[in-house]
Image: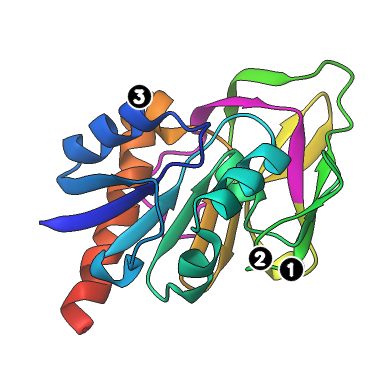
Amino acid sequence: MTSIAVIDHGAGNLVSMVQALRRVGAEPQIVATSSDLDDFDGVILPGVGATGAAMSTLSHRGLIDPLLAYEGPLLGVCVGMQILVEHSDEDDNPCLGIIPGTVRRLSARTLPHMGWNEVSGRDDPLLARLPDPAAFYFVHSYAVVPDNPSAVAGTTTVEEAEFTSVIRSGRVAGVQFHPERSGRLGLSVLASFVDGCREVERVA
């Protein structure tokens, strides 16, 4: 069975994420202390809350270096997606810097952006199985602005303002929405991630 590390940085929907991963045939394990992540087929950074608090907890728990050293499939969710980039304007704090970019406040008038919204783009493996349109559950006031437009794998529009809702750079991906709270289509996204981990496992 495909083993997935679910990183606990103090503000994730851990129970919901673990349950969702089990439903798609993975074997999730919550990781809250410095660990050798190479023992896992994939890693998920879930999250709610703020980037500054998430990075502070990761540092305190000795998880930053293991995350930076990990060479397998990595998926960031919501705040977990945001801390994949270099810097966040939310708390004016550095992030992991795995993907070049910045977290910036949404330009929508009503924040947080909360509720169901559609994601455009179907080229990424995470989205390939989805119907078009497909809606997911969002809760956020900030979004990632990648330096390289090629990292944008999906977009969403709120009040005529478009933002990046899916990013991809090689083995590393992120989704701004919560697949673990998005019903059948959210499970499809997680199933696609787990399948990608299995592909890597077979090649290895």
Disc 1: which residue:
100
Amino acid beneath label 3: Gly
At mark 2, the secondary structure is helix
For discs 1 and 3, the disc positioned in front in the rendered view:
1
At mark 1, the secondary structure is loop
Residue 144: x and y in percent read 73, 49
Q: Residue at x 42, y 39 (%)?
A: 131
Amino acid beneath label 1: Pro
Q: In the rendered structure, which disc, 2 or 3, sits on the residue that comes first in sequence?
A: 2
Amino acid beneath label 2: Ala
The numbered dot on residue 151 is 2
Residue 42: x and y in percent read 32, 61
Location of the C terminus by quadrant is bottom left
Q: Residue at x 21, y 83 (%)?
A: 203
- Quarter of the image holding residue 15? top left
Badge count: 3
Residue 70: x and y in percent read 43, 72
Tag 1 and tag 2, C-beta contact below 8 Å = yes
> Looking at the picture, does residue 19 appear above or below residue 37?
above
Asked whether 191 or 95 is in front, the reply is: 95
Residue 127 visible in the picture? no
Residue 73 visible in the picture? yes
Disc 3: which residue:
183
Residue stretch rendered in magenta on the structure:
121-144
Asked whether 25 or 133 is in front, the reply is: 25
Location of the N terminus by quadrant is bottom left
135 drawn magenta: yes
Question: 72 left or right of 67?
Answer: left
The span from disc 1 to disc 3 (Cα, nearest Å) is 31 Å
Residue 35: x and y in percent read 35, 62
